Image (cartoon, rainbow, N blue to C red):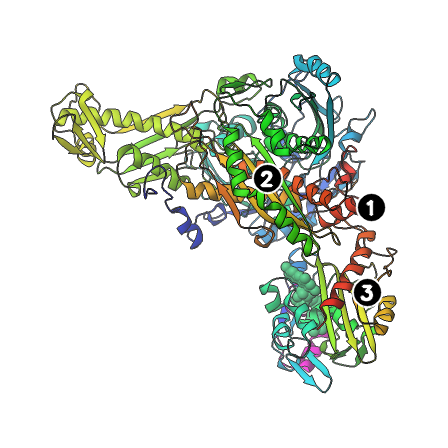
Amino acid sequence: MPKDSGIGASSKRREDVRFLTGAGNYTDDINIRGQAYVHFLRSDVAHGKINGIDTNAAEAMPGVVRIFTGKDFEGIGGLPCGWQVTDRHGEVMQEPPHPVLAQGKVRHVGDPIAAVVADTAEQARDAVEAIEVDLEELPAVINMKEALKEGATKVHDDLTSNLCYDWGFVEENKGAVEEAIQNAAHVTTLELVNNRLVANPMEPRVAVGDFERGTGNSTLYTTSQNPHVIRLLMGAFVLGIPEHKLRVVAPDVGGGFGTKIFHYAEEAFCTFAAKAINRPVKWTSSRSEAFISDAHGRDHVTKIELALDADNNFTAVRTETHANMGAYLSTFAPSVPTWLHGVLMAGNYKTPNIYVNVKAVFTNTVPVDAYRGAGRPEATYQLERVIDKAARELGVDPIALRRQNFITEFPYDTPVAVTYDTGDYGATMDKLEEMADIAGFAERRRQSEAKGKLRGLGINCYIEACGIAPSNLVGQLGARAGLYESATVRVNATGGLVVMTGSHSHGQGHETAFPQVIAEMIGIDESMIEIVHGDTANTPMGMGTYGSRSLAVGGSAMVRAAEKVINKAKKIAAHLMEASDADIELKDGAFSVAGTDKSVAWGDVCLAAYVPHNYPLEDLEPGLEETAFYDPSNFTYPSGAYACEVEVDPDTGKVTIERMMAADDFGNVVNPMIVSGQVHGGLAQGIGQALLENCVYDENGQLLSASYMDYAMPRASDLPNFEVDHSCATPCTHNPLGVKGCGEAGAIGSPPSVVNAVIDALNSGGKDVPHIDMPMSPARVWAAMNRASATGHGTAEGRSLGGASG
Amino acid sequence: MYNFEFEQPTTVADAVKALSEEDAQALGGGQTLLPTMKQRLAMPSKLVSLTAIDEIKGVKKDGDQLVIGGGTTHGTVAREASADYPGLAGLASKIGDPAVRNRGTMGGSLANNDPSACYPAALLASGGTVVTDRREIAADDYFQGMFTTALEEGEIITAVKLPIPEKSNYQKFEQPASRFPLVGVFVAKYAGGVRVAVTGASNEGVFRWTEAEEALSGDFSASALEGLSASAEGMISDIHGSSEYRAHLIGVMTKRAVTAAA
Ligand SMILES: Cc1cc2nc3c(=O)[nH]c(=O)nc-3n(C[C@H](O)[C@H](O)[C@H](O)COP(=O)(O)OP(=O)(O)OC[C@H]3O[C@@H](n4cnc5c(N)ncnc54)[C@H](O)[C@@H]3O)c2cc1C
């Protein structure tokens, strides 16, 4: 029987009531008395020198309060980068400054040049149009290969080149990998592009800066996944405001997908300007602005080689990736192609020799950083594509080839530095084969063919590293922050609880799932527990929500804090019942003395803690509130197997997803409904990447896909009914809940199965097409079938390193 | 958006008068004009809304033609033309989404003449007539290239007259992002011959595929199109498809329209 409360119950998402009835409180809903509005003047060229900015006419416009340019920020820090990568040669990465407003040069379309603060948003926008900028357009570098050529235009004059770093992992493995490839019975090589994406959360970014003259305190309201991180970065590195004088609030946030992790110029600007003009300052991004100012995702160009012995055992994997950083280093950008990508290159397989090379490149494009999955989708995609290609070349069953090479013993030390604690890849594959009804595929294909359609089946596995992560390890890897999480559990006098967490919920459902855990531990109703998050003023220091870490790390901190509370409550209960603490048991919301019928209710113990008349005051402080910080000892490793069935219209190249199946191992599951929802959302984004979404620049650095007229987002009608399962659970061995994280799996696991399915369909129709780059638009699929050009000039192919076939 | 004046006349005569002012512009359903104004790409000094003029709304059968008011929404056409002209109603029912169909109008779409708009294909394939406040313009003379028409400054489309075909169908192959046609083909069969109009494909906007018309006029079947292919010359090439791909789709969509024609 499914439970109706506590761990394992599909409790309804309590936060959805306010989201769906218009009662949410988003940053744009925050309006402070006297607030002014800022509009940014953004560069419309990809690269240019600012010879002068004339604001005279604009200053005389109605409602203008003040106009800011780079000059106003000369003495102020730039936006910091939170991760420093050390390259193959032991050198640290090149790290250019990232000013709040452009200093002398603009480096991508959308780079902010000046900002007008006015009484109304429209007045600010009017005045921006009256600013005259003497901008000398310079040649732009967009293509990563061109950017690395000798003599290429430099994005940053002060750097030696456009190469941020040249990373080798594990450098010592390089020779052994080369040898294994030389000695292989078969080597499969694949060149591919992991397409650049725009995250497009439903709520665009918003920032409201406020300065209280009376106290000298600053407050920033912002659309962030991690308000504490923003407070630390902005306070310490940009504006020089001590943390105790700065509060950052991220109220309801309408989706983040990674792009709201980072500290952005607009946040620093609003906080700074509010103090400068002594008025609150608000910025609300338009959707058009979001396309050219939110950090983009992915954009890798990769060559991967898979070596196999005569028995089809994997003997080596070697990859070379060019990773686009864009014009500046966004907060966590350097970590994505390295530590979130290279360490996953073993996948689910016991390949003994692995070498990963990543060249991170500056170009005149919007900065690129983490997007749902961050590095792990890129790793999974290339590995699962090359395995599929190898199976086709060798004429073996792609499932059997994978199974033969699965890691089966845990813990497993990969050759790329991480240790998988647990997993059962055979079990998720068994489950998937059952869900996918592989035996019935031939008949389904026959039916499609009868309609003139080609049908394909694609499968793949994935492994991800979530719950990031041990602070001491990430510190060695270049993180400039710790990655613990925190929680304060406050019990009120009448027995209700408030959990203050450093994690942040922006759609994940923490307000429902976290109480389920506490309810289970104490044996009380979920409605007695409230989650508080998103405000640095009333939550303990935490690193926020990304990398599927909230329950695994933040939830674990909450469990630790709750354990402390329960231990103390037991002492109080022992006192009340004149028993020894060791004999006290907590069950169903009541404390009892083992082996007796003595019992005292949870609420009575809580009351005693706050009205300590009959209380061991000599031994125990009154009150019932505890804080815990939790720093995990390892990543968690969710894994799974996915399958996709497509129909391809051979006349037009249009791909239709007929079936999509996901068998995931997330360890223990707190709320199965929420987990299914997370997988559904991830699948939609993964299918979006595979079939629809593409961020395209032309050779001059103009963004061609700058609105929904040209950037294709997945819609409900593009998606089938998903079939998902998470019953194959191998609990995480090192966190108290045994949970692994589920937020990114769908986006990581689905793109390769979609591509594998399309390739399978085309081959079934006699089209020997080895690979098609994402997104597999009708034009590209048709061109691949007909060896013609898919799209006009200025397409993503223009940026590729010869990896893309049209 | 920049500031503008707003007027909402109830007769065509008043609307024409209001539009005689410099930089005044007609506002139909606003589904094209308002987004353009929000992006500050258009700055009319005055908007003259046509939505309160009843005389330019509605779908009427007049002998062997269908007369559709310039202010008629796509949603109304989808419902009210379905018995007499199912090909046209089918086209209207697939424009945008319900919100767009309940606001956007026939007149606005034809006046705008977006190279990827659907209605121009229907008007041209029907050999229809554009009726304005001052004259009648034959479809073959009306379209003059991308976003360009025979309309004069301040001229209002009050109606279109579409001869009802024996059989017709519109096939729209959607551009994945906007879901406007990447290529749309309207086929209409009349006693006197077949007309085939193509939208979305050409740099010159909507056009007639005369080779297909000839082939189909002799034999109205998909097999009559075997061996015919549209030339890629002059076709649009962009991030959603090359000119070759668009040219190829013209052939595929034409065949499908003929097969589906009712
Ligand atoms: C999300 C979305 C999807 C869409 N998808 C499609 C699609 O798939 N296919 C398609 O064909 N269209 C599509 N459209 C466009 C839609 O059909 C518009 O409604 C239409 O193009 C313009 O009609 P309107 O009445 O809204 O005109 P408006 O936007 O009000 O005006 C457009 C232009 O026409 C002028 N005008 C308006 N009415 C008249 C008149 N009676 N006489 C003279 N001039 C006039 C205006 O001055 C203006 O210049 C889409 C629009 C949106 C927003």
- Relative side of A637 to A177, left or right: left
Q: Are marks 2 and 3 in contact (CB under 8 Å)?
A: no
Q: Is residue A769 above or below residue A229?
A: below
The type of residue carrying mark 3 is Ser
Q: Which residue is mark 3?
A: B223
Q: Position of residue A337 (x, y in %)?
A: 64, 27
Q: What stretch of residues is rendered in magenta? A: B8-32
Q: In this figure, which residue is indicated by the disc labeled 1?
A: A788
Q: Position of residue A153 (x, y in %)?
A: 80, 30
Type of amino acid at the residue the image marks with label 2: Ser
**Mark 1 or mark 3, whichever is nearer to me:** 3
Which of the two discs, 1 and 2, labels the residue nearer the N terminus?
Answer: 2
CA neighbours of label 2 inside 10 A, class few (<14), some (14 to 19), many (20+): many
> Does mark 2 fall on the same chain as mark 1?
yes
Q: Which mark is residue A750?
A: 2
Quadrant of the snapshot with the C terminus of chain A? top right
Pointer 1 with pointer 3, Cβ within 8 A: no
Q: How many marks?
A: 3
Query: Within the image, what quadrant is residue A310 found in?
Result: top right
Q: CA distance from mark 2 to mark 3?
A: 40 Å
Q: In this rendering, would A99 be left or right of A2?
A: right
Placement of the N terminus of chain A among the 4 image quadrants: top left
Q: Residue at x 34, y 38 (%)?
A: A515
Chain name for mark 3: B
